[in-house]
Image: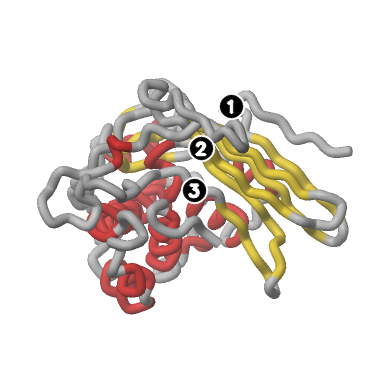
Amino acid sequence: VEHPPNGQGATAILLLNILKHFDIAAMDPFGAPRAHIEAEATKLAYDARNRFIADPGHTTRLDHMLAPGTAARLAALIDPTRAMPGAAPLTEAVHKDTIYITVVDRDRMAVSLIYSIFWSFGSGFASSRFGINFQNRGAGFTLTPGHPNEAGGGKRPMHTIIPGMVKRGGRVILPFGVMGGAYQSTGHARFVTNLADFGMDLQDAIDAPRSFSGVEGMEVERGYPDSVRARLAEMGHPVVVPDTPIGGAQAILIEDGLLVGASDPRKDGCALGY
């Protein structure tokens, strides 16, 4: 379950739909082939995001974006041995003011909440009823005439923050989220495939090293061996080692009457139960 437009949640769903066309489970979870396929799927999914996602009243191609045929056609564009150019980015200023919290109570009601003021400037207004600061998200618009996400009065811009949930049999079994700006859609896909394809437990799925093909190049965390970075570079990826860790996740698994919490060591969060 992902956040609808104007959030980028559909991007994570499209990314997972593309990855279904590859035998991810047969790959080394920490090897270059998996990182490469994920990077290529990310480029294609983010290109679709940049074309289609906007204010709910202006997002008209969502069904096309999420159609199985769209994922199949995009997956067919991926060369397993060679990197393609990255998606042309929208205005996405780097920001570090996001938090994610998830809670499950005794009745198994689950909350998946992500919040960011994006930039402090322009975020000085708060709801008199709830005391929640409004977000300064104007930088998420584009100035391209005629684009669904073109800046305009009465519109909400495309934004990156997306709380997530996994459901089974109609019931929520896993509220989760991954902070990290533009990375979040890829972070959701990486987290879900760590669980579903590689059978990692909740904490291992969060702790595992990450990579991300974004505006800074192919970021590959230090948790990967140098041989993986070298192989990705041979494939044509502009590999960089990020100065700071990629993203930050929190999650709670509801399983067999138990609640299992996990928190990302990349951030200053923790898992608490009572």
Q: Are marks 2 and 3 in contact (CB under 8 Å)?
A: no
Q: Residue 248 in the image: state x and y as whole percent.
A: 54, 35
Relative to residue 22, is residue 67 depicted above or below? Answer: below
Going by the numbered disc 2, the residue's amino acid type is: Met
Q: Are marks 2 and 1 in contact (CB under 8 Å)?
A: yes
With 209 as the anchor, is 183 left or right in this view?
Answer: left
Neighbour class for label 1 at 10 Å: few (<14), some, many (≥20)?
Answer: some
Say what secondary structure mark 3 lies in. loop
Neighbour class for label 3 at 10 Å: few (<14), some, many (≥20)?
Answer: many
Q: Residue 267 in the image: state x and y as whole percent.
A: 58, 27
Q: Which residue is mark 1?
A: 267
**Mark closest to the chain's N terminus, 2 or 1:** 2
Say what secondary structure mark 1 lies in. loop
- For the C terminus, the image quarter is top right
Relative to residue 2, is residue 212 depicted above or below? Answer: above
Q: Residue 188 in the image: state x and y as whole percent.
A: 50, 51
**Mark closest to the chain's N terminus, 1 or 3:** 3
Q: Residue at x 33, y 55 (%)?
A: 55
Going by the numbered disc 1, the residue's amino acid type is: Lys
Residue 179: give its label: 2
- For the N terminus, the image quarter is bottom right
Separation of marks 2 and 1 at Cα, in angstroms: 9 Å
Going by the numbered disc 3, the residue's amino acid type is: Ile
